[in-house]
Image (spheres, helix red, strand yellow):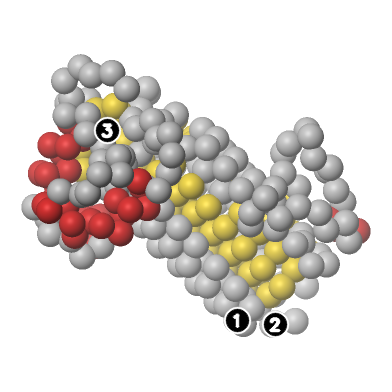
């Protein structure tokens, strides 16, 4: 076992560790679980407990009862102290490449977290949620189960995310509202800053580009992010603070 894995960590059966993995004292990893290369896991983190679903067995994975669909923490990710990540039921609960799951954060069963994302301290993400690349979720936000947060979006601290969030939107408040566009995120993703105004126009008019019609030429540079967003059925986007009244 690597010198960077504390002897006070518990590494159960069915846990696969990649190269140069660091695991702090008191961390618990239960299988099935794959930790890819260059992952850092803090003291007291808990990864791989069974899903919190009454219809499923609460197996004792530490004795070798390896039920459920597993957890995967991808290359370069950081899982800070006290974070909790549960097993998937039909797919691996996944932390994307280079993403950060900060202290006391919780990822429930079947959550898919994209690459280069940040789940801040105290955040709770409900089961089956899908969170895109470069998403930033502020401290103590709560994401309702089965919600979708598209790439580049930013969620304000303490926000209850009860609707879906379109690409590069900024959402905060109770109830949650789209309050603008993540212009810094747009630029960091390599997009023209002028797209901020265009996305504001779409979102404020209640157009969330969820249909499968051809994308307007003006947003073709966002093809990857919008294709990810449009691939999800039954989206219920958050409303806008600056929008005229419309129904959804």
Helix, strand or loop at label 1? It is loop
Spatial separation of the CA atoms under disc 1 and disc 3: 40 Å
Give the residue at x 52% y 64%: 78
- Residue 178's label in the rendered image is 3
- Mark 1, residue position: 20
Question: Which mark is first along the chain, 3 or 1?
Answer: 1
Q: Secondary structure at mark 2?
A: loop
The tag on residue 169 is: none
Q: Quadrant of the N terminus?
A: bottom right
The circle drawn on residue 2 is: 2
Q: Residue at x 17, y 37 (%)?
A: 202
Question: Which circle's residue, 2 or 3, is located before the other in the chain?
Answer: 2
Q: Secondary structure at mark 3?
A: strand
Q: Residue 64, percent across and down? A: 89, 61
Disc 1, disc 3: CB below 8 Å?
no
Q: Position of residue 84 (x, y in %)?
A: 64, 49
User: Does 166 sit left or right of 78 as displayed?
Assistant: left
Going from N to C along the chain, the mark reached first, 1 or 2, is: 2
Mark 1 vs mark 3: in front: 3
**Residue 119 higher or lower than 174, as above or below:** below
């Amino acid at each position: 076992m690597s010198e960077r894995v504390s002897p006070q960590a518990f590494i159960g059966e069915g846990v696969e560790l990649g190269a140069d993995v660091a695991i702090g004292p008191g961390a618990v990893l239960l299988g099935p679980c794959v930790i890819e290369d260059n992952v850092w896991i803090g003291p007291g983190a808990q990864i791989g407990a069974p899903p919190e679903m009454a219809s499923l067995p609460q197996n004792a994975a530490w004795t070798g009862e390896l039920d459920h669909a597993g957890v995967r923490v991808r290359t370069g990710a950081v899982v800070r102290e006290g974070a909790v990540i549960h097993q998937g039921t039909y797919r691996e609960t996944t932390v994307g490449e280079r993403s950060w799951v900060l202290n006391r954060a919780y990822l429930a069963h079947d959550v898919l977290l994209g690459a280069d994302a940040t789940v801040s301290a105290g955040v709770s993400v409900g089961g089956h949620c899908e969170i895109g690349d470069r998403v930033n979720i502020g401290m103590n936000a709560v994401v309702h189960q089965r919600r979708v947060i598209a790439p580049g979006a930013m969620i304000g601290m303490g926000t209850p995310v009860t609707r879906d969030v379109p690409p590069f939107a900024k959402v905060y408040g109770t109830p949650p509202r789209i309050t603008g566009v993540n212009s810094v995120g747009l630029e960091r993703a390599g997009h023209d800053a002028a797209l901020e105004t265009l996305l504001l126009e779409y979102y404020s008019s209640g157009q969330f580009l969820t249909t499968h019609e051809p994308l307007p030429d003006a947003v073709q540079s966002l093809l990857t992010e919008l294709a990810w967003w449009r691939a999800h059925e039954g989206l219920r986007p958050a409303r806008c603070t600056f929008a005229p009244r419309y129904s959804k």
